[in-house]
Image (tube, rainbow, N blue to C red):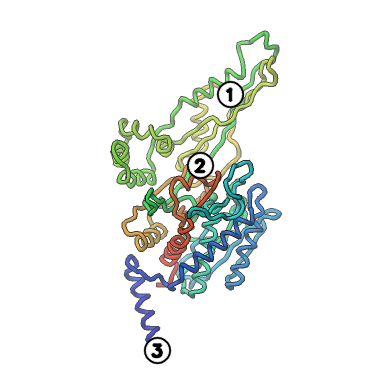
Amino acid sequence: MKRSFQAMLLAIVALACSSHRVTASVPVGNPNFDAAATSVRRLLGELVTADTTNPPGNESRAVAVGVKRLEAAGIPFEVTEFAPGRENLVARLTGDGSADPILLLAHTDVVGAAGQDWSVPAHEITERGGFLYGRGVNDDLGMAAIELEVMLLLKKAGVPLARDVILAWTGDEESGGAGVQWLLANEPDSIQAELVLNEGGGIVLGRDGAPARIQLQTAEKTYQDFTLTAYGPTGHSSVPLGDNAIYRMSRALSRVGRHRFPARLLPVTRANLAARASQEEGGLADAMRALAAAKGSLPSAALEVADRDPILSATLRTTCVATLIQGGTRVNALPAEVVATINCRILPDESIAQVEAELIRIINDPEIEIASDGEFGFAAPSPLSGPGPAAIAAAAAEMWPGLPIVPFMSRGATDSRFLRAEGIPAYGIDPLALTEDDGRRAHGIDERIPADGLRPAVEFLYRVVIELAAKR
Ligand SMILES: [Zn+2]
């Protein structure tokens, strides 16, 4: 009798959760998020201590930490080696197959801390003043730990799933993405999904320490370097000649420096401006509103205001900037060769070939060689609506009613570009809420996260996954 009453109660709770998800206060499975936060804290400590500085990576150390948890929980997983000492970890909770899987993605390599003047040891966690300090706590070991914890919670609660929930810890994100590329090339089925949740966006804390908005990353600019080479006749510097490789290159570079690629709005940047206008004040807010509402060409007065903000200006257009130069051999010899690097960040609907053609046109000197360096990978934006954004909005509404969700295009790149290129929509949504200032510590000195942020982070990601994958 008691059992059947419980079953009835559970059925009512489940019904309430499925029909009124926005107001559901008890998440499906009713996990203990305080205990989960403690568990994440321990896991994160082990991951930071594993020191997966890339290069060389040593991601197998982080994978071993994850494997211990998965084995103990009885969650099936696979470890794949993409280079010596470098591994990916893929785990899967199986649903009933009525919907396609979702993928929780994070990378386990971190950027080196050598030569950086940290105030605490970089490769262990130090708690100080309410923050957890350590290399990777934000980028991206925190998300890796939270995703794994969510897998453990789902398994423990026995939540019936409509879809498989896949966890992938990949290596080498910080220098090219060899880990995820290996999986896509060799075991694409292991991470095939309807959508992926990854780093690249997330919950932004305001000055008061409360969530101010969610930056939902749906697109990334394309990274591309170009090498320019100028040649000139050599000889004794006591006899200058009309043609000089350094002067030729300096003319080319100043043309690139003066050029501004045209400002354009993509659906993601238009939505971004519209949402941000309500959070800004004064002239900048007016300019954002005018740009977001513009049909056809962008209003020049508003554009002028926006362009005064370097970050906003870079969001509106493709940018190319000189970053390296090398030339000449001796102080008293005419230079035979000058080589310069132009680093471009390209709007994701524009091709590398288009930008190369534009550089050739701007430089307007057939004697300057222009070559694109390697291919970094690029992909079209993910849709602004659909199951991913809907689930994120629903989970956010449960935890932080009224919190604005701002679509967002990264100027940098993550592993998402490889999945988007395969047609898998990817959403940058790190569940760890950070201030913008703390967000900028990634790759830098004294990387940190708020210690009390782990609990809401686990709860938020758990709710998102429940929205997407729990059986209704
Ligand atoms: Zn990262």
Looking at the image, residue 305 sits to the left or right of residue 112; the answer is left
Helix, strand or loop at mark 1 = loop
Q: Mark 2 sits on what residue?
A: 222
* Pair 1/2: label in front: 2
Residue indicated by mark 1: 368
- In the picture as drawn, the residue positioned furthest to the bottom comes out as 1
Which percent across, then down, holds residue 470? 43, 70
Give me the C-alpha separation between circle 1 and circle 2. Answer: 24 Å
User: Disc 2 vs disc 3: Cβ atoms closer than 8 Å?
Assistant: no
Q: What element carries label 2?
A: strand
Residue farthest toward the front in the current orientation of the protein: 129
What number is the disc on residue 380?
none
Q: Where does the N terminus fall, quadrant-wise? A: bottom left
Distance of mark 2 from mark 3, alpha carbons?
A: 60 Å
| Within-10-Å neighbours for mark 2: few <14, some 14–19, many 20+ | many
Q: In which quarter of the image is residue 289?
A: top left
Residue at which label 3 appears: 2
Q: Which amino acid does label 2 sit on?
A: Thr
- Give the mark nearest the N terminus, 1 or 2: 2
The image position of residue 209, as x and y in percent, is 39, 52
